Amino acid sequence: MLSRPPVVEAEATRRAIYLAQLADAPLYIVHVSCREALEEIARAYDSGQPVMGETCSHYLTLDESNLAKPDFEGGKYVCSPALRTQDHFEDLWKGINNGWLNAVSSDHCGFDWKDQKHMGEDDFRNIPNGAPGLENRLQVLWTYGVEAGKITRQKLVDIYASAPARNNGLDYCKGYIEVGYDADVVIYDPEYRGVFSNEKSRHGVDYCAYEGMEQKGKVDTVFLRGNVVVKDGEYCGNKGDGRLVKGKPYGTMYKER
């Protein structure tokens, strides 16, 4: 938080944008956490420069107060860039709706708290940066995005699937429900009510960054290329189900700019 304040993130973002402009190259800025960096992206984007931004689910929902939790609980929330104050949340949601941030990732890091995070208990510089979030990302975006009125369902689909496919040149087979595309479909139960808990997690990490927070909705069924790999919330796929999907350089999102 002190070593990477918003002004540092903004300066690095501005410098990257200038270098990309000089090289006449597209730029994808990941893990945007603050309004100052977002303002740099917005300025370049609105001028027509092929610059895209991405943020993470924890930068939309978790604030810096988590770092002060006692008994080294704060070590769970050490990530780069650092968590910010809550007043940045609204700006990031605005950035999503305006297209300046067109994807939301998890930046999943599967470091266990008891063993790996504790390596920095006496020196924070030794704390592995990052937190788990891949399993929780969709539920977080639904609960604190769609249900909270920050984004529409259509925007959720775009930042979760369609825009990432376009960004990475995968939109010839991924990111859309259309004839000829892979039948990758998530069936989401919006009626579920509960709380995020590591007891229900399957991500193989000993903590949940969103522990105890309200959860609305959950994943019920997942189809991968038309085959059921999650049923009633339980994984039922097989090793080897995954395939290498080749992306095209400079995805169509950049070509549109």
Image: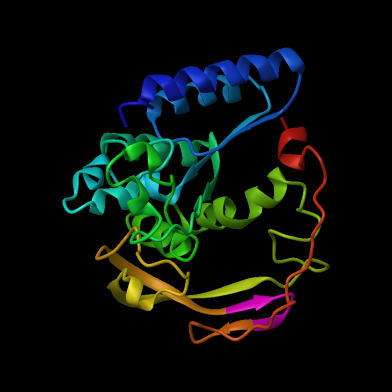
Location of residue 139 (image quadrant): bottom left
Answer yes or no: is residue 150 visible.
no
Is residue 241 toward the left or the right of residue 113 in the image?
right
Instruction: Please report the bounds of the magenta region as a residue range.
Output: 222-228
Residue displayed at 48% across by 69% down:
203
Task: Say which of 196 and 41 sits in front.
Answer: 196
Is residue 155 toward the left or the right of residue 247 in the image?
left
Q: What is the x, y in percent for residue 152? A: 46, 54
Q: Residue furthest left?
A: 70
Residue displayed at 43% across by 38% down:
80
Task: Say which of 68 and 24 sits in front.
Answer: 68
In the figure, 184 relative to 24: above or below?
below
Q: Main secondary structure of the magenta part?
A: strand
In the figure, 169 relative to 250: above or below?
below
Quarter of the figure with the N terminus: top left
Q: What is the x, y in percent for residue 126? A: 39, 41
Q: What is the x, y in percent for residue 209? A: 34, 58
Residue 134 lies within the magenta run: no
Q: How many marks?
A: 0
Location of residue 91 (image quadrant): top left
